[in-house]
Image (spheres, helix red, strand yellow):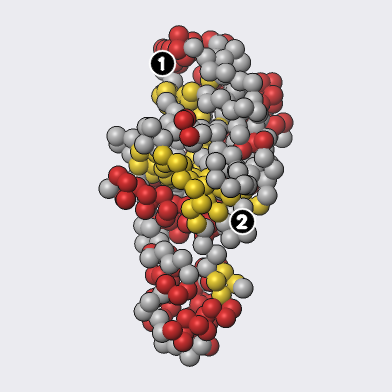
């Protein structure tokens, strides 16, 4: 069976004509698929039953569904989504006083093996299709509306997987999310986070994307970054900085560096100096993130005094840095804690 959401508008026009239906049916189908969130062809109630039955002979929708939901003490909501082929991914709704943020996944698992991240200890099973990414956003927006009476204000591609290794599906999903025919969300409210695939960062610039770019840095010299992020061996900091400057030159969009503090690894004043050097080379701001322990890794959080000293040093050196407190820790929904669980409910 073909996925009805994977055929182009021109193919849909041809299909509708072949089935002997009027051209206006194309718009009705597209509205059901993208705006109204139909789960199956039978949901399309303004199409005749005979027409729906003809569509069902060759087409399906392959909708992503919520398999399990947990709500944190801090109101964060984590979902395990099940895909049509029974794989799982996770997505998180993060409510804060000023924002309602959806954190979505782009791959089933991840191939980058970052040492501090639960997803990095999984195999990459496959890329998500663009409509599966879109579905996550729809579900999280529905939860925002039903639980908190608000629409999503922001979307971050910081869930499972490396978005730039699923480049075409991520860009197509964002195109649908920001389209008036989809969710009509401004690309300026969407952030894609990468571990630093330099070649694809340059491609983003060439494609003149309008969304924001964040880079998971986490260590500001090659020796330390190689230890915790194997991708750095093929995309070292010099290569990465050159790609980021190219991205900024083309898009005029500053970079956000994400930097998790690990006790006695990257939290010294010397480490802060290395970070300052990078920030002086790239128009950027920095999010300092508290570490969320996972069972598979031996890292620990620095104490508050160490965090304060690090932040104050950055501030004194005119780095635009903010400390991001993690949310959803009690349900393993915080940064670095998302893991695929291919078995029944926790």
Q: Residues within 10 Å of mark 2 (few under 14, many from 20)?
A: few
Q: Residue at x 65, y 28 (%)?
A: 296
Secondary structure under the numbered disc 2 in the rendered image:
loop
Question: Quarter holding the C terminus?
Answer: top right
Secondary structure under the numbered disc 1 in the rendered image:
helix
Q: Quadrant of residue 93?
A: top left
Q: Quadrant of residue 300?
A: top right
Spot occupied by residue 41 in the image (x, y as percentages of width and height): 47, 74
Q: Closest to the observer: 55 or 308?
A: 55
Q: Residue at x 52, y 58 (%)?
A: 64
Q: Residue at x 27, y 48 (%)?
A: 149
Q: Quadrant of residue 341?
A: top right
Spot occupied by residue 169 in the image (x, y as percentages of width and height): 57, 55
Q: Is residue 199 visible?
A: no
Q: Furthest-bottom residue in view?
A: 20
Q: Residue at x 46, y 66 (%)?
A: 39
Pointer 1 with pointer 2, Cβ within 8 A: no
Q: Sequence-wise, which precedes: disc 1 or disc 2? A: 2
Q: Furthest-right residue in view?
A: 233
For the residues labelled 1 and 2, the Cα–Cα distance comes to 47 Å
Label number found at residue 86: 2
Task: Find disc 1 in the rendering and name its residue.
Answer: 315
Spot occupied by residue 281 in the image (x, y as percentages of width and height): 53, 26
In the depicted structure, whether residue 73 falls above or below residue 137: above
Question: Quarter holding the N terminus?
Answer: bottom right
Q: Is residue 126 visible?
A: yes
Spot occupied by residue 330 in the image (x, y as percentages of width and height): 46, 30
Q: Closest to the observer: 250 or 20?
A: 20
Q: Residues within 10 Å of mark 1 (few under 14, many from 20)?
A: few
């Amino acid at each position: 069976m073909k996925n009805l959401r994977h055929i182009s508008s021109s193919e849909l026009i041809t299909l509708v004509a072949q089935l002997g239906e009027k051209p206006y049916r194309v718009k009705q189908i597209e509205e059901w698929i993208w705006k109204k969130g139909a789960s199956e062809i039978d949901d399309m109630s303004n199409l005749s039953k005979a027409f729906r039955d003809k569509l069902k002979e060759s087409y399906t929708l392959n909708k992503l569904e919520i398999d399990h939901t947990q709500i944190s003490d801090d109101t964060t909501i984590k979902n395990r989504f099940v895909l049509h082929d029974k794989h799982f991914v996770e997505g998180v709704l993060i409510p804060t006083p000023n924002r309602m943020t959806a954190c979505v996944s782009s791959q089933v698992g991840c191939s980058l093996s970052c040492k501090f991240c639960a997803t990095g200890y999984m195999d990459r099973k496959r890329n998500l299709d663009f409509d599966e990414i879109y579905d996550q956003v729809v579900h999280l927006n529905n939860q925002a509306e039903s639980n908190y009476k608000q629409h999503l204000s922001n979307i971050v591609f910081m869930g499972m997987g490396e978005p730039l290794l699923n480049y075409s599906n991520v860009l197509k999903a964002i195109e649908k999310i920001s389209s008036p025919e989809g969710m009509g969300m401004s690309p300026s409210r969407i952030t894609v986070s990468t571990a630093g695939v330099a070649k694809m960062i340059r491609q983003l610039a060439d494609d003149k994307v309008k969304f924001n770019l964040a880079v998971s840095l986490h260590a500001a010299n090659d020796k330390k970054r190689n230890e915790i992020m194997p991708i750095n061996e093929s995309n070292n900091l010099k290569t990465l900085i050159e790609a980021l400057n190219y991205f900024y030159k083309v898009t005029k969009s500053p970079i956000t560096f994400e930097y998790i503090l690990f006790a006695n690894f990257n939290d010294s004043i010397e480490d802060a100096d290395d970070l300052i050097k990078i920030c002086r080379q790239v128009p950027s701001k920095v999010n300092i993130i508290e570490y969320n322990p996972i069972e598979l890794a031996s890292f620990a959080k620095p104490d508050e005094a160490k965090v304060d000293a690090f932040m104050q040093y950055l501030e004194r050196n005119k780095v635009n840095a903010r400390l991001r407190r993690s949310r959803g820790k009690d349900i393993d929904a915080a940064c670095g804690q998302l893991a695929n669980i291919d078995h029944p409910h926790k």
